[in-house]
Structures are given as structure tokens and as C-alpha cells.
């Protein structure tokens, strides 16, 4: 039965609006919302291809119970219904310092679970390998359970039961979180509150890639425009250096990203990296990453700059090793350029190289992914980050699909994309790599995930910390965010710089002051600069 839309009705008196929970789950099955079901209308008015979702919530003997009924019609048959009951113990009242689920959160979660279970039965499909989880950071749930003393099997069972994850996904995310425990703050490792990471965002690229929605801009042609930005970000770095010294912070990792930082001229890159090294790097600094994502942004002189300032990890992000696809996604380089730059960075003695790959790019096949991974395995980087294509709002890819310049048939479907990821994972396993961090995004093909893999002892600490949010990260530059993490239950407060370069420059004093106040509150000095 082909389902196009659904109507919704809820029993009165619960005081909790669950319509969004229903809608979010129906989106997984590409079923649109048709609106509220007319009060008193009989089921016989329900048309073929439409569903009626009815919800009710009750509270019985210290239990919260949710009942979801989905009614549907088939041609020439009387309306039918499927019903799912979900009951859980009533949540205890929580204080501000606790991180438990309240009644509203529990009810909405049970509604999502019930709707998902019914739709899986009704359609015979499972487009949600991650169950009802919609967030970017599923590992955070696992870390909270580990904090409570649960072990691997208990956690995976809970993820399957309470969030409807496929067992393989539950095992994957639990294994990654357990692997991360030695390097993140947790109840057994609370001596890290003075350790921070630094992120510096350079918002420029040689050109804009088809799939990208990151706040990135083509490098300005007017030198004065670039100089204005460089003066601003230099002030931003210098202000952060003072904060790090003032609060006696130890910088554990430095990450220079963007954009493509190596889009800058060698002299400009040298000035910034020199200031960053002098201000932040110490005996406590374990890694210094610079993204050199595109071979057309880097040359021998810039590689020497990276080496000179002690960069320990470089990211080369081909996304594919197919010339036809590089051209399609707006890259101005070839596969051979990637191979040549990789060899030069290796020769420079920079210890770690990461390479990004995207499964699901326009026009690609399983054979293309096979060939891409074969070539990457031959290069043998220390890290590989395996992405699933996300159709991001604001990307040229989304605009091309909306305008009809590209059709949906140009993109590999969910089955092909899953086969691509399985193929890539096979090569990665042969490269002696393990998964060390994971995150998800909206609008990903097949509702899948992005996974970072690493050879033994080569995990990127910054990637772990930015995802798990248990270490303060100080953000510098346009679109950068500062996340001040309290070691007391790892609650965080954030401040963000403008994405737009002009707005960032214009309002820099405001952003610097907000960050100063944020870090002063966290580290006990309430004097506002």
C-alpha cells in the first residue's frame, strides 16, 4: 500500500502536544502531514493512501502509558487499525543538576517509538536504522549511560528497546563511546577541567563545492578586503591567547579549519600559524591539525609552512577518487593532484594524514566507491572519515535538485549508498583502522551516519571533544563557537560568532566580550574585561 499522508488526532487532557513527535517519525517514511482529523468524522471518510494517527496518554499507578492507533484503508476493504501500547515508570522529579528525562520528554519518546513500530509493521520497511534518534551526537547518550555504571550489553539492549536502534548501530555507537572514555572527562577521569581545545576558522575556499553548506567564501580578489579579515582574526587570536594565560589553561588540541585554511597565501598562513603556535602550543598540546582539504589550495611553500610550525595532522579531503565526480562537484583538480600532494606531505614528515570520502555523490556507483577506496588504501593515510551525503539546505546540490538542473535519479539511492559504505568499511578494516568518533546530520541518505576511522594511537582528539562536548572548546573566527563546559555534569554554555565575514568583523568587539564573560564565569574569575 502506497502511503502519501496522515491525519492526526489526540485525546484531550494530557497537556502535552505530541504532534511534532508524530510528524518527525512520519518524515522517515516520506509521509506528509495532511492536518487534523475532523472531529466526529467516521473512519469511512479515510481515503486510500491516507492514515489516521490517534494518540492518547494516561498515567496509571506511577506509570506513563501511551497508546497509538494507526487506521488505514485498502481499496474495497473496510478500514483497518493497528495499535501499539507503550508504558514506562513515571520519571522521578529531577533537580537542575540532574540529566534525567522528564514526563514531557518521556511521553514524546514513547509516541515516537510507538509510531515507528507501527509504521515498520505497516510498510514492511525500516528507513530508520538509528530508530527515533534525530540528534547529531548519539554517542552522548551512551556516555551518560556509562556514567551510570552500565556496561556494553546493558547499553546496547537499552538503545534497542528505548530508542529502536538496529542492534548493529547500537553496538557501533556503544563501542565508539567506550573507546573514547580514556580521553574524555567522566566520573573516573575528572582532572581535565583546565584542558581546552582551540578552533580557528578560516572561511575561504578556492571555489564552492556542490554539496557544501558550510559558511565558506571564495577567497577575495581585493587584497584590502583580505587584510581587513586578517587583522580581525589576528585580534581574535590575541584575545584568546590572553584568556588562556589569564586562566592558566592547557591547550590539548588545536584545529585550524574552515573553509580551506590553505587557500591563504603562504605568507598569510605563516603569520597566523606562527601566532597560533606561539600563543597556544605547549608541552601539554597533543595535536595540531590544519585542514588542507583541496589539493588546488596547497603547494610546496605552504607544506613547508605547515612543517615549520609543528603541524602534526593534515586533512586532505578528496571526497572521491573519480575525476568525473570531482568535475561534477566543482573541484578544480584531478585525482593525480590528490596523489601528488599526499606524497609531498608524507615527504615533509607531517605524522598524520586524514582523508575524507563521501558515499552517495551524484552519478557515482558501487564500482566508483570500490575504486576510490582501493586508491586510498594504496596511499595508506592514518585517518579516514567516511561521510554519507547529506542534502543540505543552502548547498548548490540542493539548489540544483530544486531547480531541476539535477534529478533525484542522479543520486545513488539508499540501497546503493549502504552498499558503498559496506564496501568502504571493508577496505578500512584491512587498513587496520577502528571507528573513533561518529556523528549524524539531517537529510542524510538512508538516515545513516558519518564515521571517523583511525589506525591505532592516531585518533583525532579534537574530533572526539567537539562531538562529546565534555571539554571546553574556544572558537576563533567567523562561524566559530565557544562552548564552555562545566565539569559538574558537563553542562555547557555557548557563544557564537557571525557566519558572515563582514558581520564578524563589524561586531568582533561584541563577540570577544561575550566569550570573555563566558569563560570568566566558568573558571571562577568574574571580572569582565
Image (spheres, helix red, strand yellow):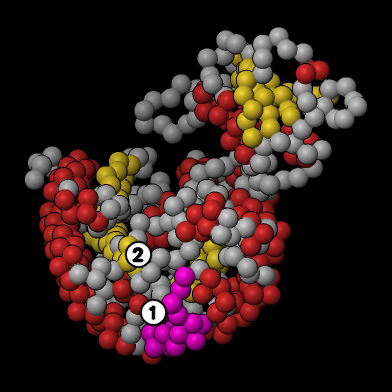
Counting other residues with Cα less than 10 Å from the Cα at mark 2, is it few (<14), some (14-19), or many (20 or more)?
Answer: many
Q: Is residue 207 visible?
A: yes
In-front residue for pair 133/162: 133
Q: Position of residue 48 (x, y in %)?
A: 80, 29
Q: Quadrant of residue 25?
A: top right
135 lies left or right of 410: left
Against 394, residue 86 (above or below) is above
Report the magenta stretch's main SS: helix
- Residue 83 appears anywhere in the view: no
Q: Identify the residue at horizontal 60%, vertical 32% (top origin).
A: 23
Q: Seen from this angle, which residue lies furthest bottom?
A: 347
Tell me the residue at 62%/47% (across/down).
130
Return the x and y of residue 283 as percentages of the image width and height.
24, 70
**Is residue 223 positioned above or below 143 on the image?**
below
- Residue occupying image coordinates x 71% and y 9%: 40
Query: Is 344 colored magenta in this rendering?
Result: yes
Instruction: Please tell me whether residue 526 is drawn above or below residue 442 in the rendered image.
Output: above
Q: Give the quarter of the figure containing the C terminus.
A: top left
User: What's the residue at 72%, 24% (across, down)?
Assistant: 52
Q: Write down the residue under mark 2.
A: 259
Q: Nearer the viewer, residue 190 or 28?
A: 28
Residue closest to the eye, 290 or 414: 414
Q: At numbered mark 1, what does the secondary structure look like: helix, strand or loop?
A: helix
Q: How many marks?
A: 2
Q: Which residues are magenta?
A: 330-346
SS at mark 2 in the image: loop
How far apart are the alpha carbons under marks 2 and 1?
13 Å
- Residue 387: x and y in percent read 54, 62
Question: From what the image shows, is residue 382 above or below residue 127?
Answer: below
User: In the image, which disc is placed on residue 296?
Assistant: 1
What crowding class fits label 1: few (fewer than 14 Cα within 10 Å), some (14-19), or many (20 or more)? some
Amino acid at each position: 500500500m502506497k502511503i502519501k499522508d496522515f491525519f492526526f488526532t489526540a485525546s484531550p487532557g494530557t497537556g502535552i502536544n505530541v504532534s511534532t513527535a508524530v510528524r518527525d517519525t512520519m518524515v522517515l517514511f516520506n509521509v506528509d502531514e495532511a492536518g487534523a482529523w475532523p472531529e466526529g468524522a467516521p473512519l469511512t471518510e479515510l481515503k486510500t493512501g491516507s492514515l489516521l494517527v490517534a494518540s492518547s496518554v494516561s498515567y496509571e499507578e506511577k506509570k506513563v502509558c501511551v497508546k497509538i492507533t494507526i487506521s488505514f484503508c485498502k481499496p474495497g476493504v473496510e478500514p483497518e487499525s493497528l495499535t501499539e501500547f507503550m508504558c514506562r515508570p513515571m520519571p522521578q522529579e529531577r533537580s537542575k543538576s540532574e540529566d534525567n528525562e522528564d514526563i514531557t520528554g518521556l511521553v514524546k519518546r514513547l509516541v515516537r517509538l510507538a509510531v515507528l513500530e507501527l509504521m515498520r509493521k505497516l510498510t514492511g520497511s525500516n528507513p530508520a536504522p538509528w530508530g527515533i534518534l534525530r540528534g547529531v551526537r548519539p554517542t552522548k547518550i551512551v556516555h551518560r549511560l556509562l556514567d551510570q555504571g552500565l556496561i556494553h550489553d546493558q547499553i546496547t539492549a537499552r538503545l534497542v528497546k528505548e530508542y529502536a536502534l538496529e542492534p548493529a548501530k547500537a553496538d557501533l555507537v556503544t563501542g565508539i563511546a567506550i573507546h573514547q572514555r580514556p580521553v574524555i572527562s567522566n566520573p573516573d577521569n575528572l582532572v581535565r577541567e583546565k584542558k581546552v581545545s582551540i578552533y580557528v576558522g578560516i572561511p575561504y575556499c578556492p571555489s564552492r563545492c556542490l554539496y557544501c553548506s558550510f559558511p565558506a567564501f571564495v577567497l577575495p580578489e581585493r587584497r584590502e578586503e583580505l587584510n581587513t579579515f586578517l587583522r580581525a582574526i589576528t585580534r581574535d587570536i590575541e584575545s584568546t591567547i590572553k584568556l588562556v594565560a589569564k586562566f592558566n589553561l592547557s591547550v590539548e588540541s588545536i584545529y585550524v579549519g574552515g573553509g580551506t585554511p590553505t587557500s591563504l597565501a603562504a605568507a598569510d598562513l605563516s603569520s597566523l600559524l606562527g601566532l597560533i603556535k606561539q600563543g597556544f602550543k605547549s608541552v601539554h598540546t597533543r595535536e595540531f591539525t590544519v585542514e588542507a582539504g583541496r589539493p588546488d589550495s596547497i603547494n610546496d611553500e605552504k607544506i613547508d609552512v605547515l612543517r615549520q610550525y609543528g603541524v602534526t595532522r593534515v586533512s586532505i579531503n578528496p571526497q572521491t577518487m573519480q575525476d568525473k565526480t570531482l568535475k561534477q562537484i566543482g573541484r578544480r583538480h584531478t585525482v593525480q593532484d590528490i596523489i601528488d600532494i599526499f606524497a609531498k606531505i608524507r615527504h615533509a614528515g607531517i605524522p598524520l594524514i586524514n582523508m575524507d570520502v563521501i558515499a552517495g555523490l551524484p552519478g557515482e556507483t558501487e564500482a566508483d566507491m570500490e575504486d576510490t577506496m582501493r586508491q586510498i588504501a594504496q596511499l595508506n593515510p592514518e585517518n579516514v572519515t567516511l561521510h554519507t551525503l547529506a542534502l543540505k539546505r543552502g548547498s548548490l546540490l540542493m539548489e540544483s535538485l530544486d531547480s531541476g538542473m539535477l534529478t533525484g535519479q542522479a543520486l545513488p539511492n539508499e540501497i546503493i549508498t549502504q552498499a558503498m559504505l559496506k564496501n568502504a568499511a571493508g577496505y578500512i578494516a584491512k587498513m587496520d583502522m577502528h571507528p573513533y568518533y561518529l556523528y549524524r546530520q539531517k537529510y542524510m541518505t538512508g538516515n545513516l551516519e558519518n564515521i571517523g576511522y583511525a589506525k591505532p594511537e592516531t585518533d583525532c582528539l579534537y574530533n572526539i571533544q567537539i562531538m562529546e562536548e565534555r571539554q571546553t572548546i574556544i572558537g576563533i573566527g567567523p562561524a566559530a563557537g565557544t562552548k564552555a563546559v562545566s565539569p559538574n555534569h558537563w553542562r555547557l554554555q555557548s557563544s557564537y560568532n557571525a557566519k558572515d565575514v563582514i558581520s564578524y568583523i563589524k561586531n568582533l568587539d561584541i563577540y570577544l566580550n561575550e566569550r570573555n564573560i563566558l569563560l570568566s564565569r566558568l573558571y571562577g574569575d568574574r571580572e569582565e574585561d
